[in-house]
């Protein structure tokens, strides 16, 4: 258990790109990047379909949408640009993975939501929500090790980790709790699944990194 909180950086593995700005990566590197992003979108869909609550960033989007009248999709795009602005003082730069992150995850959510079960009992809703968070964490471990550029939110996480030296799990928990608190204050809907994500995604990302490093 303590090993989860010992993870302080994304490891370089045999398929990792030598630079996150590589526009002609090895086929294996490109494969793991896309595998991670597909699983990430699937995990988000599993959480949404559980009916137990959405991720903290969606809560934030709901809150801002309710205050401005803008659509949640448009708010999500604005939030993503705002996060990329925060990358500047953290010395983070977007790469191929940053762009594919937005495209593939959005496609997978739309594609898989119509295929997933929508449980009606609370126990199955909670189980499905927990599975969704775990899948997102594993997916993060896979796509981040490709080293082709993090998504906006993961780039914020790794940038803050590099600046502070704190464990990735601790940084991610801090980000998610902050975001969901602001979203709830603005009127976003918080469910049990939201709390699962806020407190569980940091450790799950660390588990994903440990899994990839050991077994892949």
Image (cartoon, rainbow, N blue to C red):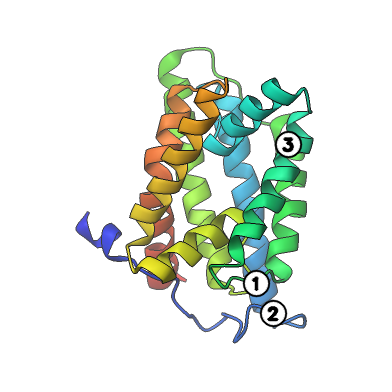
In the image, what residue occupies the spot 59% across and 33% down? 60
Question: How many numbered callouts?
Answer: 3
Question: What residue is drawn where x is 77% and y is 45%?
Answer: 107
Circle nearer the N terminus (3, 2): 2
Up the image or down, 205 lies above or below 185; here it is below
Reading the image, the residue beneath label 2 is 21
Find the residue positioned furthest to the bottom: 18
- Image height of 107 relative to 153, above or below: above
Report whether residue 68 is seen. yes
Q: CA distance from mark 3 to mark 2?
A: 27 Å
Q: Nearer the viewer, residue 120 or 8?
A: 8
In the rendered image, residue 128, in percent from the top left (x then y), is placed at 49, 30
Query: Tag 2, which secondary structure?
Result: loop
215 sits left or right of 135 in the view:
left
Indicate the secondary structure of the residue bearing disc 3: helix
Name of the residue lying farthest toward the left: 2
Left or right position of 184 against 38: left
Between marks 1 and 3, how big is the CA–CA gap? 22 Å
Mark nearer the N terminus (1 vs 3): 3
Question: Could you tell me if the residues under marks 2 and 1 are in contact, i.e. CB atoms within 8 Å?
Answer: yes
Residue 64: percent from left, percent from top:
66, 29
Front residue of this view, candidates 186 and 175: 186
Question: Residue at 48% across / 58% down in the picture?
Answer: 157
- Mark 3 Cα-neighbour bin, 10 Å: few <14, some 14–19, many ≥20: many
Judging depth in this view, the residue of 115 and 41 nearest the camera is 41
User: Which of the marked residues, 2 or 1, is nearer the chain's N terminus?
Assistant: 2
Question: Residue 211 placed where, x, y %?
Answer: 40, 63
The label on residue 93 is 1
Which SS class for mark 1? loop
Residue occupying the point 51% across, 25% down: 184
Question: Which residue, given by chain and number where applicable, does mark 3 sit on?
Answer: 75
């Amino acid at each position: 258990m303590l090993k989860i909180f010992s993870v302080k950086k994304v490891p370089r593995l045999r398929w990792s790109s030598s630079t996150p700005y590589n526009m002609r990566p090895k086929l294996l590197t490109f494969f793991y990047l896309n595998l991670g992003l597909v699983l990430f979108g699937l995990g988000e869909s599993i959480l949404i379909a559980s009916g137990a609550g959405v991720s903290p960033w969606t809560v934030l989007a709901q809150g801002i949408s309710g205050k401005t009248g803008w659509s949640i999709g448009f708010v999500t795009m604005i939030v993503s640009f705002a996060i990329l602005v925060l990358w500047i003082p953290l010395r983070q730069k977007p790469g191929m993975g940053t762009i594919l992150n937005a495209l593939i995850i959005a496609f997978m959510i739309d594609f898989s939501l119509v295929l997933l079960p929508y449980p009606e009992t609370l126990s199955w809703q909670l189980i499905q929500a927990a599975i969704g968070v775990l899948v997102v964490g594993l997916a993060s471990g896979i796509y981040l090790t490709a080293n082709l550029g993090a998504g906006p939110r993961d780039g914020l996480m790794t940038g803050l980790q590099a600046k502070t030296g704190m464990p990735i799990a601790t940084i991610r928990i801090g980000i998610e709790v902050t975001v969901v608190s602001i979203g709830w204050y603005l009127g976003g809907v918080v469910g049990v699944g939201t709390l699962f994500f806020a407190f569980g995604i940091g450790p799950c990302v660390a588990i994903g990194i440990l899994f990839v490093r050991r077994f892949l």
